[in-house]
Amino acid sequence: MGGGSEAREQSARLLATCLIAGVVVVAGASLLSFYLSPNASPLGLGLGKWRRKKKKPVRVYMDGCFDMMHYGHCNALRQARALGDQLVVGVVSDAEIIANKGPPVTPLHERMIMVNAVKWVDEVIPDAPYAITEDFMKKLFDEYNIDYIIHGDDPCVLPDGTDAYALAKKAGRYKQIKRTEGVSSTDIVGRMLLCVRERSVSDSHNHSSLQRQFSHGHSQKFEDRGSGTGTRVSHFLPTSRRIVQFSNGKGPGPDAHIVYIDGAFDLFHAGHVEILRIARGLGDFLLVGIHNDLTVSAKRGTHRPIMNLHERSLSVLACRYVDEVIIGAPWEVSKDMITTFNISLVVHGTVAENNEFQKEKDNPYAVPISMGIFKVLESPLDITTTTIIRRIVSNHEAYQKRNEKKNASEKKYYEGKTFVCGD
Ligand SMILES: *[C@@H]1O[C@H](CO)[C@@H](O)[C@H](O)[C@H]1NC(C)=O
Ligand SMILES: *[C@@H]1O[C@H](CO)[C@@H](O)[C@H](O)[C@H]1NC(C)=O
Ligand SMILES: *[C@@H]1O[C@H](CO)[C@@H](O)[C@H](O)[C@H]1NC(C)=O
């Protein structure tokens, strides 16, 4: 989708032209030897460098808070990357988020891990300002060589009522992408609070009013259409096209050492990213098994998962350390599965919500353990899905305020919504 495939196509065409015309023999030969050389990087990459000498890469910039990062953010980054050759992402500092919308759920260092792990991101600028000032814009153009500033088609209004991207628009260096429907942080918080309410009825007064506010806009819509009750509904319409856009579309190479890790990967967070990074480092191809919604509910309670199977799959697929996912993996890692995928190592992190498995009489990893291909990995971060839910709940008053502000602009967005081209 990005400049990569375009570059590859262009280079393939170039190579074809060279060979057919029979001219530029030297270039043709060196290209061929490059192609045949076993240690060379893939054809596209090598020629990409060659092309760059002629044409400067288009660098695009996108910024955001990326708090409670979800596949909607990932999709925005994917679309932004497709508008250029290199994507630079500015991550807003904690202080700026506090000043503009209230405390973030995820501290900057975790948000940095999340953004850096998205496979369409080439560079990250930490501590980006909430609004692009004249100074910062100059810095983007002069120091970071940015060609265009990208933002979604939803309005981004500053507390003083002005358009956050007015300067970039005036400079003629602004491009727009289509907002990803189906998910927003507000909606996710609504689902989390609902799950907390289901669990502790005694505490319900506090959360129910909050939950109503968080999920208002969306649940209303669904009720209007006469479908479903409650707020645990998603606007997300999974299409095969979206899954293809997120996929690498490549299987393991010959003799690849295939590592397998499974889990719910609910509310995909920095702890997940870090364990996936380590798992990927143990082989050449990382296969991730994502348990289906029923399995997750059965193991962790009816209020889980917060994100459905397709949503969880997209978040995992967007991660650069992941090569392939199994959408709805079995709970038990069977001999058949190991053979089918030629798995050579099965791993599991020390920090996980189901670390009682060793004691269970039906240990899901019994087969890989007996084959001597099971390994427990030290999790770099002590974060689980429960940690994220706790952070939200313990901070709910601040979110309540923050959401009141957001409520109005969301409503306006949905009322004024029209069809926008793009994917
Ligand atoms: C709401 O929660 C806070 C702390 O989380 C607690 O101090 C307060 O008593 C609760 N209020 C009600 C009405 O339950
Ligand atoms: C299966 O994986 C092993 C590495 O564990 C590799 O050596 C072997 O070539 C793979 N088999 C195939 C058919 O790719
Ligand atoms: C949020 O917006 C709805 C209308 O969509 C309104 O009825 C509700 O009172 C608003 N809530 C807050 C807290 O502003």
Image: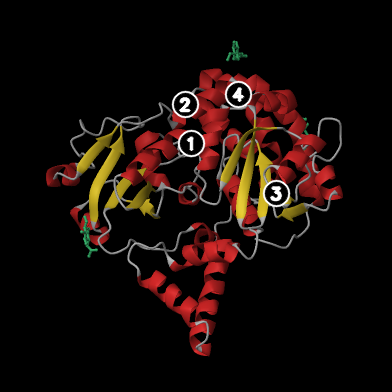
Going from N to C along the chain, the mark reached first, 3 or 1, is 3
Can see residue 233?
no
Q: CA distance from mark 4 to mark 1?
A: 23 Å
Label 1 residue SS:
loop
The kind of residue tagged 4 is: His
Q: Position of residue 179 (x, y in %)?
A: 69, 51
| Amino acid type, label 2 | Thr
CB at mark 2 closer than 8 A to ligand 1?
no
Q: Circle 2 sits on which residue?
A: 387
**Are discs 4 and 2 less than 8 Å apart at CB?**
no
Q: Earlier in the sequence, mark 1 or mark 2?
A: 1
Real-space Cα separation, disc 4 to disc 3, in angstroms: 44 Å
Residue at image location 82% in from the left, 30% down from the top: 159
Residue 146 badge: 3
Percent from the top left, x then y, of residue 52? 59, 62
170 vs 409, nearest the viewer? 170
Instruction: Give the image location of residue 64, x and y in percent.
Output: 66, 39
Q: CA distance from mark 3 to mark 2?
A: 37 Å
Q: Find out whether the residues at labels 1 and 2 contact each other: C-beta distance under 8 Å.
A: yes
* Labels 4, 1: front one: 1
Q: Quick one: label 4 or label 1, which is nearer the N terminus?
A: 4
Looking at the rendered structure, the secondary structure element under dot 4 is helix
Asked if 55 appears above or below 284 in the picture, the reply is: below
Check disc 3 and give the amino acid type: Ile
